Amino acid sequence: METKVGSGLGIDYTGMMSSLQNQSGFARGDLLNLQKDLDLAQSSLEVRREAGEIDFSKLLVSMKTQIPEIVDYANAVASKFDNFVVLGIGGSALGPLAVHQALNHYYYNELPPEKRSNRPRLYVVDNIDPVRFNELLQILDPRKTLFNVISKSGNTSETMAQFLIVRDILRNECGDSYGEHIVVTTDREKGNLLPIALKEGFQRFVIPLGIGGRFSELTPVGLLAAAVCGIDINQLLKGALDMDQWIREKQGVFANPAQLRAALAYLSGQKGKNISVFMPYADGLKTMADWYAQLWAESLGKRYDRQGRIVQVGQTPVKALGVTDQHSQVQLYVEGPDDKVITFVTVEKFKETQVIPLDSKLPEDIHFLGGRTLEELVSAEQTATEYALTLAGRQHQRIILPSLEAYTVGQLLLLLEWETAYMGELLNINAFDQPGVEEGKNGTYALMGRKGYEARRQEIAEYAKTRYLLYS
Ligand code: PA5
């Protein structure tokens, strides 16, 4: 029953289906019953694609043509700067971070320059915690640093605040050449960042139309940082394009991985499983879980359906890491409320291996570890957890990556994006907007005194008058 494509990414959904050990799983018929809805979802996504709204394929192809420009620029700056700092938040930060952690050396920044091909260290600063921001500025020499300001809207308070602070420092430290230390990634036409970039002559990359923040990793948002660190962005895009093709060409829930994953998520949601746990068994995918959580939460957590009826849908994404969280969250998953569905992500072949030494003089009870590898131990722990969940009647599935490399990461990104799009259609909501986020942004503008937001400021002041507090 396993869906496979060549030697690339695979999905094992045995743990979602009924079996001798797991009576609470689905039957094939449950999935087949959804086929009509999936076909409708497919056509509706097709319409959106035609309208240029979510054209992943066109986007990926057009990105391929931009690769030489991105790579040339990345190589030029890589030899000039010691540090590359991404200033952005949400979709403008989580993708670059996830790909960096998945594909670069885990301690990339700590490596001596020659061990990272003399490429800059990479920092992704999403939050505006003043301590962290200040402490980062303390360790960076601005004259040797390139800042990549990323904002699709060109208005987000956090990113604009970071930009203003950095621009000021650069102007003081680098004088007239400060503009050479800033590269802006933003919309082609809109936002406040664009006119500043044009006026001050910053290098600029464009986020294509119709691509929301969380779907923009495979645009200059993510590709530039990846290329600066020497990641093979051709392979990243190739993996994504191959996955896109698989999803567009293979019809039917048992052949199409995005339909399959969306159908399983939808059915589990209907059974009251309102929590979707994403649990990779590789430290390199820890921040991929952050990226997935944003994608799932912001795309699918919606109050209204397409007809404007209140539906309040969306599974809550939870990030976990194997094996670490076996000693933290797994107890809850096995024995707590049956309201979760777990996606493991496993890597078949790690890029490093580590043999556990054998010492026959040590207590016999630990001899079993000797001569085995950490890879084997990780795999055994994942299988054991999977089995414990199965025995407890808890649903789970697994995304299998043959190895963690640019190609498979590209595949994974596109699979998760497409399944989110399908899930949005099954839920009959718009997965591509984020009115709840905008609400927060508007409140911030109001509180910080932005012109045009006076009424909202007044409202919040009224709300803040009544407080229930307890202090020591
Ligand atoms: O996915 C999204 O649309 C959001 O998470 C945005 O990426 C985030 O709010 C930052 O927005 P912007 O890139 O416009 O600064």
Image (tube, helix red, strand yellow):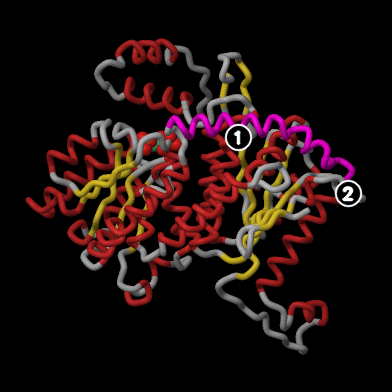
Could you say where residue 433 lies in the image, as x and y percent from the top left? 47, 28
Q: Which mark is residue 19?
A: 2
Q: Which residues are magenta?
A: 22-51
Q: Is residue 358 above or below residue 252?
A: below
Q: Can you tell which of label 2 and label 1 is closer to the viewer?
A: 1
Q: Measuring 20% from the left and 56% from the top, which residue is drawn there? A: 142
Q: Measuring 48% from the left and 17% from the top, which residue is drawn there? A: 467
Q: Is residue 337 above or below residue 343?
A: above
Question: Label 2 amino acid?
Answer: Ser
Ligand 1 is within 8 Å of the C-beta of the residue at disc 1: no
Left-right relation of 138 to 61: left
Q: Which mark is residue 42?
A: 1
Ligand 1 is within 8 Å of the C-beta of the residue at disc 2: no
Q: Is 33 within the magenta?
A: yes
Earlier residue among tags 2 and 1: 2
Q: Is residue 454 visible?
A: yes
Q: Is residue 14 above or below residue 26?
A: below
In the foreground, 69 or 310? 69
In the foreground, 272 or 64? 64
Q: Measuring 53% from the left and 47% from the top, which residue is drawn there? A: 290
Left-right relation of 176 to 447: left
> Within the image, what quadrant is residue 318 found in?
top right
Q: Quadrant of ligand 1?
A: top left
Q: Is residue 324 visible?
A: no
Number of residues whose C-alpha sits closer than 10 Å to that of mark 2, classed few (under 14), some (14–19) or many (20 or more)? some
> Within the image, what quadrant is residue 421 found in?
top right
Question: Label 1 amino acid?
Answer: Gln
SS type, badge 2: loop
- Kindly report the distance in space between the C-alpha atoms of the residues bearing marks 2 and 1: 30 Å
SS type, badge 1: helix
Magenta region, main secondary structure:
helix
